[in-house]
Image (spheres, grey):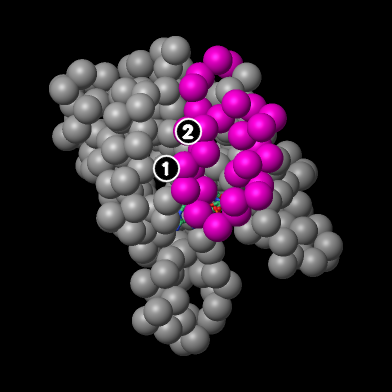
Amino acid sequence: MKNVLITGGSRGIGKECVYLFAEKGYRVFLNYNKSVKEAEKISEKTGAIPVKCDVSDEEEVRKMYTFIHDNYGNIDVLVNNAGIAQIKLFTDISEKDWDNVFNVNVKGMFLVTKAFVRDMISRKKGKIINISSVWGITGGSCEVHYSASKAAVIGFTKALAKELGLSGITVNCVAPGVIDTDMNKNFTAEDIDALKNEIPLGRIGTPKDVAKVILFLASEKTDYITGQVIGIDGGMIM
Ligand code: NAP
């Protein structure tokens, strides 16, 4: 049985990943931070093992690693999905806002990857899938800190893919467009309609649209793919 760790598995895209990977027979570790009830509910339905950990906290990440490693062994697939967003004018972004976004979206990915990659290197196998965003490629107005953090995910993915290629580890990322999750709950119906007009496929994405591609990137079908950014955006950017 393959082990997969999905960070931020309690809601949205991560939650859908938990369902899909569990359905495919993976042993799933569902990392969450605040959504205890949601994590327990998903765990009851899927058999996923919930692990509470703030990915931006090195000590908590170390404990998550020790719990998983000592009880279940190595992780085969790591999905760095946990992320936060914030809509603000650039001039209103405080140092704290900037740090919050970078601590989760960038430092969290760094800490979790660093904790689990050593075992992948010793075993000479593993798949790491990071979640960027279309805004990390094009830049999103009123989301400068979020866009910069998602651009960092792309740089991280490519650099690590180069470094770990000879260790038999692939590192890829996905760049979703507008996906129907809590992250976008502040959009009005008019906002959504305006967005749909920008999307050739004429609809916003579902968490499943993204989770299916992440599952694909975790499979042996992608053994010769590394360092790539896969857009999942209905053609929004091309
Ligand atoms: P979401 O519905 O808001 O869910 C965010 C998830 O991240 C939750 O499970 C949350 O867990 C977890 N999380 C947040 N801070 C955390 C921390 N410090 N430690 C551990 N987990 C933490 O968001 P989503 O839309 O599914 O987004 C998932 C990923 O896709 C993010 O990286 C996001 O940037 C990216 N993305 C989303 C979209 C979109 O349109 N939705 C587009 C492009 C990229 P708790 O609730 O337990 O704290």
Mark 2 lies within 8 Å of ligand 1 (Cβ measured):
no
Q: In which quarter of the view is residue 165 placed? A: top left
Residue sitting nearer the eye, 194 or 125: 125
Q: Residue furthest right?
A: 189
- Return the residue at label 1: 80
Q: Residue furthest bottom?
A: 91
- Return the residue at label 2: 29
Residue 58: in sight, yes or no?
A: yes
SS type, badge 1: strand
Residue 30 falls inside the magenta stretch:
yes
- Location of residue 179 in the rendering, given as x and y in whole percent from the top left corner: 66, 48
Q: In the drawing, does residue 81 fall left or right of residue 195?
A: left
* Residue at the image point whose x is 47% and y is 33% from the top: 29
Residue sitting nearer the eye, 134 or 206: 206
Q: Amino acid at mark 1?
A: Asn
* Residue at the image point whose x is 83% and y is 62% from the top: 189
- Location of residue 237 in the rendering, given as x and y in whole percent from the top left corner: 56, 47
Q: In which quarter of the view is residue 45 placed? A: top right
What range is drawn magenta here? 24-52
For residue 83, above or below residue 45: below
Residue 138 falls inside the magenta stretch:
no
SS type, badge 2: strand
Question: Residue 185, which numbered label?
Answer: none
